[in-house]
Amino acid sequence: METANLKSIPSEEKFQDTANKVIRHGEPSSPSLTVQPSQSHKTLELQSSLKWSFWTVFSSTFITIFFAEMGDKTQLVTLLMSAESQSPGIVFLGAAMALISTSLLGVIIGYWLSKKLSPKTLDLTVAILLLFITGWLMSDVIC
């Protein structure tokens, strides 16, 4: 049994276009004829998009958080605690659990908010919140 080359499988749009051309040019067709690509074709596209989507989301999240945390107060506190305690393994476990917990809390609240608010409203709310925090920090530095 030969396996199909993925490049030789036409996209759903191309498949539908070809089917529409055949129907428009007066070739024999039935009024109840509906053209659907094979289920395995849809499954392959879905699996491919899910795989790509996972790695895109994972890598962008990792890189963003990694660079955002570099030199952050959390990293500096972890550095100092590790130097003072002489138990870097325990400090690492404690810091890792704390970061996982706060990340989990952020993901849960973010997911819940995404179900309650439109993306535009959520973006505007976060922008206003960040401006408020920036103003608060600036006033703390200036005063």
Image (spheres, grey):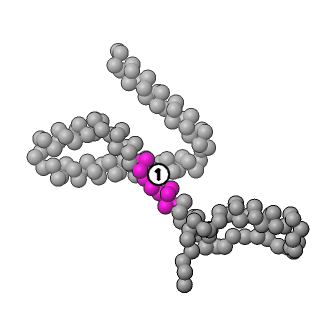
- Residue ID for mark 1: 57
What is the magenta range?
50-61
Q: Is residue 120 above or below residue 109?
A: above
Residue 2 coordinates in the image, percent (x, y): 55, 81
Q: Is residue 128 above or below residue 85?
A: above
In the image, 30 versus 53, the foreground residue is 30
- The residue at the point 70 percent across, 61 percent down is 14
Residue that sits furthest to the top in the current view = 143
Q: How many marks?
A: 1
Is residue 108 in view from this perspective?
no
- The residue at the point 77 percent across, 66 percent down is 19
Q: Is residue 95 above or below residue 2?
A: above
Residue 63 coordinates in the image, percent (x, y): 38, 45
Question: Which quarter of the figure is the C terminus placed in?
Answer: top left
- Amino acid type at circle 1 is Val
Q: Is residue 35 magenta?
A: no
In the image, 70 versus 142, the foreground residue is 70
Q: Is residue 55 magenta?
A: yes
- The residue at the point 36 percent across, 38 percent down is 68
In what element is the residue under mark 1? helix
Question: Which quarter of the figure is the N terminus placed in?
Answer: bottom right
Q: Is residue 105 above or below residue 121?
A: below
Residue 112 coordinates in the image, percent (x, y): 52, 50
- Please, what is the dominant secondary structure of the magenta stretch? helix
